[in-house]
Image (spheres, rainbow, N blue to C red):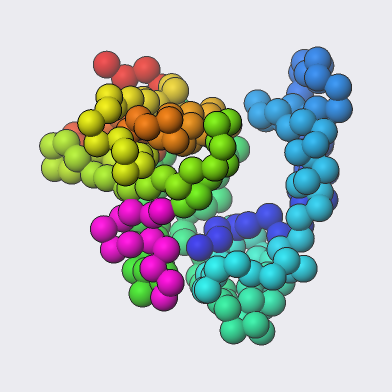
Amino acid sequence: MLWNPVTRGRPYVRELQAIAASAARATPLVEGALESAGSIMTAQTLESVRAIDLIAEPPRAGHILVAGRDDMAPDTSLADHLAALGRGGRVPAPPGLGRHDGRAPVHGRARRGAAIDRRMGQVARELLALDAKGALRRDGRALRGVATASGAATIEERMVRFGADHRLFGVLTRTSTSADRPVVVIFNAGAVHRVGPNRVSVTLARELAAAGLAVLRFDLEGIGDSVRRTPGRENHPYPR
């Protein structure tokens, strides 16, 4: 499911450069890098992003659904291209994207509305029904080969819900040799969800799993995909 995707990388980089140009402070002290809205891209990453063209790239998924924004005219080029290939198409935009996008501070954003949650649930059911190859098992597990600092490894990543009313959500990363080894738990970094700043928690979890440890990275209640059980502030960066 692609939600308001960046179809071509070159104009996206230009947008990032425009945002960076409006910042009050100078660019980072890394040659060729770009700091935009608090995130840094190296010169190598910028070149890789500029080369992205989803229409020119053969689709790697069996079925791809594309949703735009609900507050502006959609770009249907990618959805039309996928439909012509028989690999996907356009779906109605979930309501509220214009109010819940990345322009607001992460700790001040409202929780996604019930209509968005229902739409995402519907999309998830459609994609699972189309998962002919079974890459994502019905029990929420996925096996993947990853390259780590110590070499290639095959790890298992499993989506888990736990805690009171199963409101907490996380990802358990491990290998078949992790059963009798210590478990590492990674919490949120402020209001950043379980992937961590620049996905460092994902990289760390996979490296530790390849070394034989099990790693659980999960969202604290009210952050990311862990839903609050009681009324209160969502995405609070410093909860008790």
Q: Residue at x 60, y 67 (%)?
A: 60
Q: Residue at x 16, y 36 (%)?
A: 163
**Total marks placed:** 0
Q: Which residues are magenta?
A: 132-143
The outermost residue toward the left is 164
Q: Is residue 232 visible?
A: no
Name the image quarter holding the C terminus.
top left
| Vertical comparison of 73 with 18: above or below | below
Q: How far across and down, in percent of the image, does residue 147 sit?
A: 57, 41
Residue 79, by quadrant, is: bottom right
Residue 177, by quadrant, is: top left
Residue 135 lies in the magenta stretch: yes
Q: How far across and down, in percent of the image, does residue 25 sit?
A: 77, 16
Q: Residue at x 65, y 26 (%)?
A: 38
Q: Is residue 66 visible?
A: yes
| Vertical comparison of 108 with 48: above or below | above
Task: Out of 129 and 78, give the one closest to the viewer.
Answer: 129
Task: Out of 135 and 16, give the one closest to the viewer.
Answer: 135
Q: How far across and down, in percent of the image, does residue 95 sit?
A: 46, 59
Majority secondary structure in the magenta region: loop
Residue 161 appears left or right of 98: left
Q: How far across and down, in percent of the image, does residue 220 sit?
A: 31, 29
Q: Residue at x 69, y 77 (%)?
A: 81
Residue 164 appears left or right of 99: left
Residue 45 appears left or right of 155: right
Residue 72, by quadrant, is: bottom right
Task: Out of 194 and 20, give the one closest to the viewer.
Answer: 194
Residue 195 lies in the magenta stretch: no
The outermost residue toward the right is 32
